Amino acid sequence: MAKVLSVNIGTKRELREADLGITGIDKRPVDGPVAVAAPGPRGVGASGVAGDVICDLRHHGGDDQAVYAYAREDLDVWAVELLGRELPPGVFGENLTTTGVDVTGALIGERWRVGSSLVLEVTSPRIPCRTFAGWLGERGWVKTFTQRALPGAYFRVLEPGPVEAGDAVTVLSRPGHGVTIGTAFRAFTTEPALLPDLATVEALPEYDKRKIRRALERRATAAE
C-alpha cells in the first residue's frame, strides 16, 4: 500500500555551509495531522507544510516547491551505500517520507491524493546543494547524490488539506509525455542531451522552463 510513513517539519538551525548561515533542512517527524496549502510564489512563499521552516527563500520554497517527498525505499538504498548509516525520516530534508510509491519514477505533472482531501502535483526533482552536503557531512556528497540519481520530488498544492503519518497515497492521473523525476534530474545534471524532452512539459516550474530555453538556445547558437 502506498502511504505516508511520516510528516516531517524543520526548525531553524545554524549551518556553516548554508548560504545564509541558517537552514531549515533538519526536519523531524511530527504526530497528528498537519495542514498543507499553497504558500505563494517563489521568493515570497516558504513551505506549504504548516510549521515547517525554510530560510533561503531565493532557492527554496514557494508554490512549485511547496512539499518535498522522498521514498523510504530510496533512503534504505542510501543506508546500504553509506555503510549502514542510520537515515531516519526527514534526514534528507523531506516533508513526506513515503513508502510503496515510486517517487523517482513519478511523471512531471502526475497528481497524487494524499489522505482524504490533499491533492499534490509533481513539479521537479531536488538538485543537491552545499547545504545538503554540509548537513549530511558526507565527503563528495553532491557528486555522489547526482550520480545515483534518486532525487526525490517537489510538489505544488492543487487542493489543500491535512496530512499525517499513515495517510494513503493514490495516484490520480499521469500525463502522457513520459518525463519522470529521474529523467528531469539527469537532464538538469549529467545528461543535458535530455533537455529537449522537457521542453514541452507544461507542469514544470517557470524557472525551469526558462533554464531549458536558455540551454537550448545556446546549443542552437553553437551549432550554427
Image (cartoon, rainbow, N blue to C red):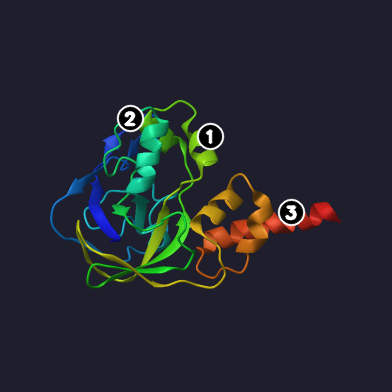
Give the CA distance from mark 1 to mark 3. 25 Å
Residue 32 seen anywhere in this rendered image of the structure: yes
Q: Is residue 97 above or below residue 63?
A: above
Which numbered disc, 2 or 1, marks the residue closer to the eye?
Answer: 2
| Circle 3 residues within 10 Å: few <14, some 14–19, many ≥20 | few
Residue that badge 2 annotates: 85
Rendering coords of residue 94 (x, y %): 33, 48
Q: SS for tag 3?
A: helix
Give the CA distance from mark 2 to mark 3. 42 Å
Asked which quadrant contains residue 92, the reply is top left
Q: Which mark is residue 143?
A: 1
Going from N to C along the chain, the mark reached first, 2 or 1, is: 2
Q: Are marks 2 and 1 in contact (CB under 8 Å)?
A: no
Residue that badge 3 annotates: 218
Q: Is residue 139 above or below residue 18?
A: above
Residue lying furthest right in this view? 224
The kind of residue on which mark 3 rests is Arg
Rendering coords of residue 81 (x, y %): 42, 32
